[in-house]
Each structure stands twice: as C-alpha cells, then as structure tokens.
Image: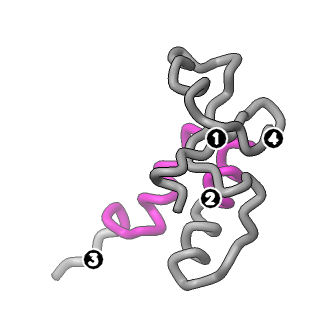
Amino acid sequence: KQFSAVGSARYNRANKLAGYNSLEKRALEDSRSIARRLVEGEQFQDNTGGSTHYLNPKTATDTSWMSKLPTTKVIGEHTFFKDEFYGK
C-alpha cells in the first residue's frame, strides 16, 4: 500500500481545522479531549443537575417544549431541563 500524507489522520485534522478561528479550535480540541476521556472511563461531575435537554432561550427557534420540563440549572446563556422519562 502506498503512503499518502493526504490520507493521514494528522493531515486531515489540520485540514479540517483550517477554517476555524483560535477560539473555535480550542473548543473543538477540548470537546475531543473530554469525549476521549469519557470513552476511556473517566468520570466527570454533572454540573447540570442531571439534565437531559438544554437551550439558549435567546437564540432558540422553538421553545414550546421547555415549559413542560422542570429547569435544573442555568449556566450563562443556557437553560438546562430534565425529562424524568429519559433522566433515570
């Protein structure tokens, strides 16, 4: 099999990040790191009160469902909710 730098994970990762600004790149790297750590079994504290849903009410296009669920936490611009059916 012939080696190709274009097909390598390192090239693809750099190429995918090319269109992002530094803040977006950092957020993407942080989320990848957290996902990797979760898959490897690391435990994280849930600071949302066990929420199953969230939204930013200032930017959400459909907020009709939120009145049906109890609010568990507000963090910055985001409001978190818990649907008891899914949150067990």
Q: Are marks 2 and 3 in contact (CB under 8 Å)?
A: no
Question: How far from the left and from the top, in percent, is residue 67?
Answer: 61, 24
Stretch of the chain drawn in magenta: 5-30
Q: Which residue is mark 3?
A: 3
Q: Which residue is mark 2?
A: 31
Question: How far from the left and from the top, in percent, is residue 24?
Answer: 67, 43
**In this view, 49 is above or below 3:** above
Front position in the image: 39 or 79:
79
Residue at x 73%, y 44% (from the top left corner): 72
Front position in the image: 20 or 60:
60
- Looking at the rendered image, the quarter that the N terminus falls into is bottom left
Report whether 87 appears left or right of 26. Answer: left
Q: Are marks 3 and 1 in contact (CB under 8 Å)?
A: no
Q: What's the colour scheme?
A: one colour
Residue type of the residue flagged with mark 1:
Phe
Residue at x 56%, y 67% (from the top left corner): 35
- Dot 1 lies on which element? strand
Residue type of the residue flagged with mark 4:
Ile
Question: How far from the left and from the top, in percent, is residue 27?
Answer: 68, 50
Image mark for residue 75: 4
Residue type of the residue flagged with mark 2:
Ser
